[in-house]
Image: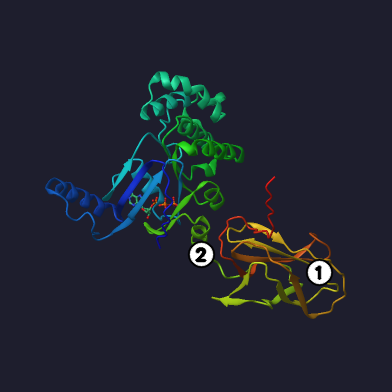
Amino acid sequence: MIEKQNIQTDAEVLVKVEGLSKKFCKDLKTSLWYGVKDLAYNISGNKNERLLRDKEFWAVKDINFELRRGECLGLIGHNGAGKSTLLKILNGLINPDAGKVTIKGRVGALIELGAGFNPILSGRENIYNNGAVLGFTKKEIEAKIEDIIDFSEIREFIDMPVQNYSSGMKVRLGFAVAAQMEPDVLIIDEVLAVGDMGFVLKCFKTIDTILPNTAIIFVSHSMPMVSRICSQIILLEHGKAQFQGYDIGKAIDLYYMRFAQNESNVVFDDGSIILESVKFLNISNVVNNVPQFKWKDNIELELVLYNKLLTTIPYITLSIFDKEQRGVAIFNYEFIKVNITKGNIKLNLKHSNLQLSKGTYSLNLIIYEKQKLQNPILRMNNIISFQVLYEIETWPPFLLDCELIVKQI
Ligand SMILES: Nc1ncnc2c1ncn2[C@@H]1O[C@H](COP(=O)(O)OP(=O)(O)OP(=O)(O)O)[C@@H](O)[C@H]1O
């Protein structure tokens, strides 16, 4: 599904990708044999670059996009979808089998952890090397080196060989070089995942600062990070663009659909009480067994528990989780202690004016024997899922109803 919205800006196109494809072979021996054959073909003119031979597959297939200064493209997709391969082609590390990449200006890249660094050289020496690769003179690097070291926050270790750096230190140095060298195009692959929170926040701040003058391509499995910085997304599936466009919420929803789980699971159970059934009583609609509500609907949930051992009603916590397993809300109610006997207990929970954003949610249940957060006796994840429908896709979990009054003053 390609959703292209024409957002016309005057900013210059820095990255243009046309019909880009790359194939790999699943078997090393066959791959070497094809390599030899390709070499011969290339001399006589290869006519089969768009065809797959036995054991070959497309790691990247027919990718097209344009990226302007000031735009950030997010590349998302499951493991092995082709994101890193696409980045490596863009960075010139591997050649495509078909298609064309046109990049204007200086490219800074943070691709693999430690890639681009010589492990036996010190951090300082690597800054000079990287600067030279980016086309800076020694004098220009000297003018920037203090800022780079300051940004990396590893001044103490800057003269130590990079091979002794921790993963986070390598990322700090890599990001400091890539960002402080003012690239026109910045390629970032997942590496931010290993930085600590302080450094990640600093990176985001830097990305915000350099973005107006840079085109950024960002690969990540962290949807909060993607939604924080990307203006457009390509969702890759087996090398192809399954979705391409500016609707970040929609792209993220499609990404999560692949990982949707419909089964509940018991995390802890001491056998004193069991969940017999759970259902919504006032559903607008059900699609694929998932109840749907409209934004601002009232919801009513019915739980039936079977009590085996308890003598008073336990304390029940129901929390709402989004598709990324972020806890987004918890139901609050007044707990009234009542005596119970062995057998079924029915509970009805009502909530009015549901203001969750469009999306799919699930409920987790924890039952405590006596009071809030004391002696859990049953803990179950995903006891029921539901969807909230609305026209607008938004990434934040709440869409709060409000009124805006505008007055000329
Ligand atoms: N040099 C190679 N030779 C053969 N196959 C390769 C090579 N490099 C990558 N692949 C394959 O290409 C496919 C795409 O890999 P790629 O690393 O681009 O995925 P990815 O989307 O970045 O995954 P991840 O999220 O795990 O980083 C995978 O099936 C991978 O095994």
Classify residue 379 by image quadrant: bottom right
In the figure, is residue 347 to the left or right of 325?
A: right
- Mark yes or no: residue 294 visible: yes
Outermost residue toward the left? Answer: 44
| Residue carrying label 2 | 257
Circle 1 — which element?
A: loop
State the image coordinates of residue 280 (x, y, percent, origin top left). Answer: 67, 76
The residue at label 1 has a CB less than 8 Å from ligand 1 = no
State the image coordinates of residue 361 (x, y, percent, origin top left). Answer: 62, 65
The residue at label 2 has a CB less than 8 Å from ligand 1 = no
Q: Quadrant of the N terminus?
A: bottom left
Q: How is the image coloured?
A: rainbow
Q: Is residue 85 above or below residue 152?
A: below
Q: CA distance from mark 1 to mark 2?
A: 35 Å
In the figure, is residue 396 to the left or right of 171?
A: right
Look at 36% across and 27% down and name the residue there: 135
Mark 1 Cα shell of 10 Å, populated few (<14), some (14-19), many (≥20): many
Name the foreground residue: 96 vs 281: 281
Outermost residue toward the bottom? Answer: 343
| Residue carrying label 1 | 314
Mark 2 Cα shell of 10 Å, populated few (<14), some (14-19), many (≥20): few
**Circle 2: residue type:** Met
In the figure, is residue 36 to the left or right of 258?
A: left
Classify residue 321 by image quadrant: bottom right
Sequence-first disc among 1 and 2? 2
